[in-house]
Structures are given as C-alpha cells and as structure tokens.
Image (cartoon, rainbow, N blue to C red):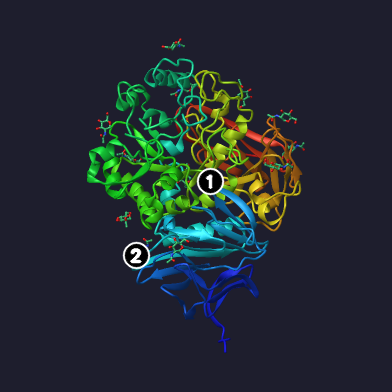
Amino acid sequence: MMNLLLLLIMVAGVVNGKPVSLSVEGGRISFRVGEDVWLESVGAVVGNESYAGSSVGRTFEFGAMRGRLRSYKNSFIFEQHFPEGLEGTTVWPRFKPSTRRCFTYHGDFPQMASGTLETYQASDQGGLPLVVFDEETVSILSPLENPKAQRAVAVGVGIKTSAPAGWTQRWILTFGSSMRRTFDDWGATVLALLNVTNDLRFNMYRDPVHATIGFWTDNGGYYHYSTGLWPNQTYEQVLPLVKAYHESLGLKFGHWQFDSWFYPKDGGVSDGAVVNWTSLDSVFPSGMAAIQEKLGVPMVMHNRQWSVVSDYIKASSAGVEWLATGEPPNGAAVPRDPAAFFEWFFQQQDGWGLSMYEQDWMCTEYDKVAAMKTNLTLADDWLRGMAAGLLFGANLTQQYCMPYAYDVIAAAGFPRVTNARASNDYFHDKHGRQNWQIGATSLFYTALGILPFKDGFYSSNLPQPGGQNAGPELHPDREIIIATLSAAMVAPMDGLGYMNATRIKASCRADGVVMKPDLPLRPPDVCFFSDPPDYDIKPESCMIYETFTDFFDRRIHYIYFDNTTWLDETMLDDPNPRETKNLVAYNWYTRQLSALPTRLTPGYENHSYALVSPFLNGLAFLGQLDKYAPASRARFFNLSSTPNCPLQLTVFGVNESVTTCAATNNFTLVCETISFSAPRTENLCLHP
Ligand SMILES: *[C@@H]1O[C@H](CO)[C@@H](O)[C@H](O)[C@H]1NC(C)=O
Ligand SMILES: *[C@@H]1O[C@H](CO)[C@@H](O)[C@H](O)[C@H]1NC(C)=O
Ligand SMILES: *[C@@H]1O[C@H](CO)[C@@H](O)[C@H](O)[C@H]1NC(C)=O
Ligand SMILES: *[C@@H]1O[C@H](CO)[C@@H](O)[C@H](O)[C@H]1NC(C)=O
Ligand SMILES: *[C@@H]1O[C@H](CO)[C@@H](O)[C@H](O)[C@H]1NC(C)=O
Ligand SMILES: *[C@@H]1O[C@H](CO)[C@@H](O)[C@H](O)[C@H]1NC(C)=O
Ligand SMILES: *[C@@H]1O[C@H](CO)[C@@H](O)[C@H](O)[C@H]1NC(C)=O
Ligand SMILES: *[C@@H]1O[C@H](CO)[C@@H](O)[C@H](O)[C@H]1NC(C)=O
Ligand SMILES: *[C@@H]1O[C@H](CO)[C@@H](O)[C@H](O)[C@H]1NC(C)=O
Ligand SMILES: *[C@@H]1O[C@H](CO)[C@@H](O)[C@H](O)[C@H]1NC(C)=O
Ligand SMILES: *[C@@H]1O[C@H](CO)[C@@H](O)[C@H](O)[C@H]1NC(C)=O
Ligand SMILES: *[C@@H]1O[C@H](CO)[C@@H](O)[C@H](O)[C@H]1NC(C)=O
C-alpha cells in the first residue's frame, strides 16, 4: 500500500491573500498557492540515476544525496548535501513540465526568453533565474552561493559535476504577486542570505566613475583600435587633444575608459588573449602613469581572458600555478589559486588611476578553460578571488562584461561588483536585440543591486568618419535617455569634433554629475500580465521602460516608449497607490501636459518619453525640464508644503542656470530660474 498520508510541512508567505504552502508525500513535493498546485517536484536524479525518494519531515533521501527544505520569509530554500561526495550530476527539485507561463535568461549579456514550462529549455550557464508567472502569482527559482557549480535542466536544478564529500549546494524559490516586487523580494532575500548589505553596492554616486559622465573607447566607439584622423600618431599623442576638445565644449568628463587596445595579446583584436596587462609601447610610449598624468581622471580599464603563454605564467607571478587549455590565440588560462593571484595582481597598477576593473570576455574564459567545467569549485573561486583581490587595490570596483546569468548571480555576493553589461556592444546587435534594449535584463540585475550598463554610444546623429565606427547614430536621444535611466555610467564615445555637447549636458549637472533616477529602468508589470493596448507581444519584446525619483510624499515617474504611445496608470510602479489618483503626464518632447490615460505624440526620433507626477496642493512637481531625469535627487531635495508655500524645495546648482517647473491642475507650467555661479543650495517656492 502507498502511504497516502499527506504531511503539510511549511508555509512561506501569502500571495494575493492566499497562503503559499507545500505538502510532501514520499519524494514528491506539491507547492500550492491557496488550493492551486503551482509547481510539483517528483523524485530526483542523483549520479544519473532516478530516485523516487522518501522524506522524514524536511529531509529527503535520494541515494547518495540528502535533500533539505526550509522556508525563509516568502521563499523556500532547497539544499542538496552529499555526505560521502558524488560521482556525476543531480536534479532536484525536478519540476513537472506544465503549460504555466515562464521566462528565463540565456547566453552572455543574458537575454530574456519566454515560453511555458513545456517549452522551457535550459542552457549552459543560463536558464536561471527561472520565473513562472500568471496574472496573480510569480515565483522565481535561482541558485544561492556557488552558482557556477550548478546547472539548470528542463525542468530542474542540480550540481554540474562530481562533488567532494561534504559538499552542500543551495537554491531559492521566492513567491510574490507583482513582477517587479517579486524580483525585488527575491533579490533582497538572496542578498540577505549572502550577508550582503544592499546599500553597500547600490550607491550609484559612490565615486566619480559611477557619479559622472565618462568618455569611453569601447568596441563600437570612435577610438576603439583607432586614433581617428591621425592614424600615424599614438594614443599618447591623440588622447590629450581629445581631452582638450572636451574642455572646449565645457564637458566635465569625470572618468575615462580604456579598452583592449592598450595591452599586448597573443592574437588579434577579436581572438587574442591577454599576455601582460600593461600598456604597449606603441600605444603609450611613455607608459601608463605618464598618460594618466595628462588625463588626470579615474579610469575604467578593460581586461579579457588570460593567455596560456602569459608573462604571469612564465614568471610564476605570486607563486601561482595556472590551469590552461589550448594553444595561442585560442587557448585560455586561469590561476589555480585565484585569490592569491588577484591579491598580487591588483597591486601592480600604481599610478594608473585605476578605479573600475572591467573583466570582459567572461564567457570565453569560462568556456575555454576545461577545468572550469570539470572542477566543481574553480569557476566560483575565480570570481570570488577576483572580487577579494579588488580590496588590495585603491578603492577598486568591478564591471562584469559578457557575463553569463550565473556570473551575475555570483556577483550578488561581491559588493564591489557594482555593475554588469546588460546588452551586446554598441551597434553590434545580437539575435535582433539592440544594444539599448536593456529593460528585460535590468529586471534581473536591478533586483540584485547590480547596475545594468548599456555600453557607450554616440551623442551625435552626424557621420563620424575616421573612427572605428563611422556612424551615423540615428537615435542618439534614445541612447542617452536609456543610459541615464540605467543609473549606470553615461558614456559617450564620439570622435574629436563630433560630440553633441547639448545632448550630453542634458544628462548631467554642470559639474558632470549625472542626474540619475533612483533605480535603473525596468519594464512595468503590464508587459507581463496583460498586453499593452497597442499590440500583442512577448515580455522580452516589450519596449516600455519605467523608473522614478522618490521624495518623501511623492514619486515622479519617467517612462520611455519605443514604438507605442499609450500611457496609463498600469505602467507606473507606485508603492503607494492612492484611491483617487490625480496625476499629470508631461511629454518630454512636445512639453504638453495632460491627464491620464493619454496618447503621447512622439518626438523627433519617433519614440516617446514622458514624466508622470501627482498633484499635491494644486501643483505637480516636474523639475528641470531640459534634463532627461528632470526631478533627479542629484539636483532637488527636501520637497514639502508649508502654510506659506504649496511646493517648497531645495535646489543644488554648480555653475549654471537651473529652471525648475511644476504643473498646475489646469495644465499649465509654472517655472522659476535660479543662477548659480558656485556650488551651493538655494531654497525655492513654487506657486500655482
Ligand atoms: C553520468 O552521465 C554523464 C554524461 O551522460 C557521464 O559522463 C557520467 O559518467 C555518468 N555518471 C555516472 C555515475 O554514471
Ligand atoms: C552569513 O552569516 C551567517 C551568520 O554569521 C553565517 O552563518 C553564514 O554562513 C553566512 N553566509 C554566507 C553565505 O556567508
Ligand atoms: C601613415 O603612414 C603610412 C606609412 O608609414 C603612410 O603611407 C600614410 O600616408 C600615413 N598616413 C597619414 C595620414 O599620414
Ligand atoms: C609585464 O610587462 C612589463 C613591461 O614590459 C614588465 O615590467 C613586467 O615584468 C611584465 N610582467 C610580468 C609578470 O612579467
Ligand atoms: C579545483 O579547483 C580548486 C581551485 O578552485 C583547486 O584548489 C582544486 O585543487 C581543484 N581540484 C582539482 C581536482 O583539480
Ligand atoms: C577611496 O575613496 C574615498 C571616498 O571616495 C576617498 O576618501 C579615499 O581617499 C579613497 N582612497 C584611495 C586610496 O583612493
Ligand atoms: C544636438 O542635440 C540637440 C538635442 O539635444 C539637437 O537639437 C541638435 O540639433 C544637435 N546638434 C547637432 C549639431 O546635431
Ligand atoms: C515594437 O518594437 C518591438 C521591438 O523592436 C517589436 O518587436 C514590435 O513588433 C514593435 N511593435 C510595433 C507595434 O511596432
Ligand atoms: C521617424 O519615422 C519617419 C516615418 O516613418 C521616418 O521617415 C524617419 O526616418 C524616422 N526617424 C527616425 C530618426 O527614426
Ligand atoms: C533638507 O532639510 C533638512 C532638515 O529638514 C536639512 O537638515 C538638510 O540640510 C536639507 N537638505 C538640503 C540639501 O538642503
Ligand atoms: C562656468 O561656466 C562658464 C560657461 O557656462 C565657463 O565659462 C566658466 O569657466 C565656468 N566656471 C567654472 C568655475 O567652471
Ligand atoms: C491656470 O491657473 C492659474 C492659477 O492657478 C491661473 O493663473 C491661470 O490663468 C490658469 N490658466 C488657465 C488657462 O485657466
């Protein structure tokens, strides 16, 4: 006889008033939202064998694996434990496929792909987080620590290769009801379980690289393997001219980025691995410290996969051995003791001004070094060792570039990994996905406190002959709006003579500090739960992106629409929905004010961009309307109403004239202008 006794062992939170619970019968687990079975896990695969399994309370026995389950707030935590170790791989939980809608992320610069649990496919280093959703419920499954040691399958998770005795691997399944809220809860829970304080990482003004506009030379930019109109001159000769040009435009670039053109490789631009992370004599004949003296700004510097014939291997730098696969230029290597290597490595850049270390080609390093796949711990140790090494440099942060989804989940545990690239290189579209389309990936990154960088861009729509990329960029406003709303770096890459300073200045204060929103842009829930009125789409194709600036009594929304024009309240992420909403929409391009819902008139690049703000005491605050994030907290503080003043606020200005506007409830603008000649704050009162 089967044991038909159902043992209810746990409840984790409430979704839309319904308890999330699970019941266990032998090795079978049913997750319910109210009465509805949301997911069902049946047995496990351990060392390639299937086991029906048995359970005693929260502990499951499947051959050589012990499964453990516990609830934590609105989540369940799964633990696979191998007391004696294991030859082979595992799958547990092992979910029954169903017609439930889901999406996940695949590939480098992980991109969203949606379908159902029947059509779901896992991928190498992707397929997680796995989001299962309907109009009322959202669940998110992902690994916790050591994400590179695990893998996804259709449909489940497990360790990717043999485990030593005593190994434990954990995953989390979080439940909620709104897409963005559930992502935020998932991210907060992951960070809490990894002992990371979110505000440690999520300080988008922590240093000049994050806070100010920067000049970049990445792939797709004018100076990527090109010195422009002076091909026979070195970077050492040309870059100071570029800096002087920026100064002549009054642009205060607070950081620069050097890409892979500065260091020696064992092959070409697109395949060579790094031989020695130092400047080539042909690029900077006087060396890195000399060019840094001329530029005098904090630097972002690029690195790629390590060569199998690198100077570090030859010199046994830091006494570390290397694991290498293949021959130059196709091979790659990784230090056997990454923590020891990177502790030494990050002390070798004296005088470079290095502030952010950009690790690019992360997928390549992982894919090419065989031991990354056969050794359960090496890939996580590589990431952990890099992150720990940063502490030995001066105030270093790190950017992940070409990361897999699992790299980004690993980064949740490393507070100095502040950002990751969310799309392919500028003008290099991938699978029809354009570089600016970062919203779907931002949903994932933002929840973990990782800023989604969109890469640099051209600020001008004119041709830029002589550079790597001659353009023209036909939608520079779209580029810079998305960059500004990403809350990551705003990084023009134009050539000398080609920059559009007016456009760049619309992203920042006169001192170059970017006027950012409070969080990176993300698609609103309407992209997942009901099709926007204009067209039928999959969530990954929904090009409506929203973010905001919060003051204590109100939220000012910024909403970008690529090819739709309908704006209503379902597109607003509002933590305090009021019974009777009294909102105004401001069309950034036409300056029209209207009530919601409304249809926006697109601007000159054919997209629409709007602010939405609530009326309080007869005025809706909008801010400095010639900026892309007009209400940014880099400019405005301390909004309040007093008996004498319906809208009082503090304005911070540098060396500039700031016009601050609000909307009246008969849809007219009221504005006041303050001129600043030195950095200071001014109080201002706006009256209807
Ligand atoms: C499990 O399967 C993999 C690939 O199918 C194989 O390489 C491995 O030897 C198998 N392990 C065991 C314990 O059978
Ligand atoms: C987090 O901190 C707790 C308490 O100090 C500790 O038991 C746990 O192992 C830590 N978790 C991680 C992932 O470091
Ligand atoms: C650069 O140098 C090459 C060979 O030395 C020469 O043929 C070419 O004309 C030079 N170009 C310019 C723009 O000076
Ligand atoms: C890398 O190159 C620099 C400059 O040539 C040299 O001083 C340094 O020793 C090299 N690094 C190693 C590990 O050999
Ligand atoms: C796996 O990699 C780690 C470094 O992460 C190393 O200490 C260990 O020796 C490696 N194991 C094997 C079997 O090579
Ligand atoms: C690190 O950053 C802090 C804050 O920006 C600054 O005060 C300090 O001087 C920096 N330290 C180094 C070594 O650059
Ligand atoms: C620069 O950008 C502004 C929009 O910010 C645009 O109006 C102007 O025409 C552009 N200038 C050039 C020379 O393209
Ligand atoms: C809007 O753009 C997206 C992405 O480019 C595309 O998939 C969709 O079909 C477009 N919709 C309309 C109505 O043009
Ligand atoms: C805007 O749309 C019009 C009409 O389809 C088209 O002619 C024009 O090229 C578009 N402009 C841009 C910048 O895409
Ligand atoms: C905001 O107001 C508080 C007190 O209400 C004050 O301490 C603070 O300095 C003000 N901030 C600015 C930027 O004026
Ligand atoms: C202030 O801005 C003006 C131009 O707007 C510029 O000429 C001047 O040098 C700036 N002053 C400072 C201190 O940056
Ligand atoms: C809008 O209201 C303001 C004061 O609240 C008033 O001065 C103005 O005349 C009104 N405009 C219209 C068009 O009614």
Instruction: Report if the beta carbon of the residue with label 2 is closer than 8 angstroms to ligand 5.
Output: no
Residue lying furthest bottom in this view? 1
* Badge nearest the viewer, 1 or 2: 2
Q: Earlier in the sequence, mark 1 or mark 2?
A: 2
Residue density around tag 2, few if under 14, some if 14–19, many if 20 or more, within 10 Å? some
State left or right for residue 382 relative to residue 622: left
Local secondary structure at mark 1: loop
Viewer-proximal residue among 316 and 565: 316
Viewer-proximal residue among 470 and 353: 470
State left or right for residue 280 relative to residue 490: left
Residue 383 place in picture, x, y as percent: 38, 49
For residue 394, which numbered disc appears in the image?
A: none
Q: Amino acid at mark 1?
A: Asp
Residue density around tag 1, few if under 14, some if 14–19, many if 20 or more, within 10 Å? some
| Residue visible at 74% across and 49% down in the picture | 536
Residue 203 place in picture, x, y as percent: 44, 46
Local secondary structure at mark 2: loop
Q: Quadrant of residue 594?
A: top right
Residue at numbered disc 2: 164
Residue at numbered disc 1: 518
Q: Quadrant of residue 556?
A: top right
Q: Amino acid at mark 2?
A: Pro
Q: Is residue 471 visible?
A: yes
Residue 586 place in picture, x, y as percent: 68, 39
Residue 430 place in picture, x, y as percent: 58, 40
Q: Is residue 230 above or below residue 592?
A: above
